[in-house]
Amino acid sequence: MTDSSKKTREVTHMKAIAINRLGGVKVLVDVYPQTGRASGPNKAQFASYLGVLALKKVSILVPDWDHVTKAEKDLIWQDLCVSNSFKV
């Protein structure tokens, strides 16, 4: 396999979330306020969606979540609230 034909990772779009959003369907996710952890049957889908948002909003040069600015975290939270995909 040559370098030019090497398969690369593509952007994740979470098509099922977009379809639900268009249909007006909200996915229910329980989040414990004390820990901030999601639970229930949709927790993996929720975590994946948050990961996609984080990849779009946070630079890959940031070493870990502790170094993400509050402004960036607020943007992710705002996008989550506006997306209308999850009922938290």
Image (cartoon, rainbow, N blue to C red):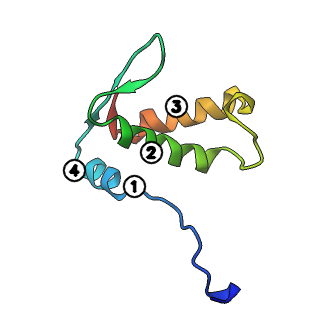
Task: Check disc 3 and report the residue beneath it.
Answer: 77
Task: Check disc 2 and report the residue beneath it.
Answer: 48
37, 21: nearer the viewer: 37
Ranked by sequence position, the earlier of labels 4 and 2 is: 4
Which residue type carries mark 4? Gly
Residue 6, relative to residue 23: is it above or below?
below
Query: Badge 1, how many Cα within 10 Å: few under 14, some, many 20+?
Result: few
Spatial CA distance of label 1 from label 4 is 15 Å
The quarter of the picture where residue 13 lies is: bottom left
Say if mark 2 contacts mark 1, CB within 8 Å. yes
Say if mark 1 contacts mark 4, CB within 8 Å. no
Q: Nearer the viewer, mark 1 or mark 4?
A: 1
Residue drawn where x is 50% and y is 39% of the image: 79
Ranked by sequence position, the earlier of labels 1 and 4 is: 1
In the image, taking residue 9 as reference, residue 68 lies left or right, namely right
9, 1: nearer the viewer: 1
The quarter of the picture where residue 64 lies is: top right
Query: Badge 3, how many Cα within 10 Å: few under 14, some, many 20+?
Result: some
Which residue type carries mark 2? Ser
Task: Check disc 1 and report the residue beneath it.
Answer: 14
Residue drawn where x is 44% and y is 39% of the image: 47
Task: Check disc 4 and report the residue beneath it.
Answer: 23
Residue 55, relative to residue 47: is it above or below?
below
Which residue type carries mark 3? Trp
Spatial CA distance of label 4 from label 2 is 20 Å
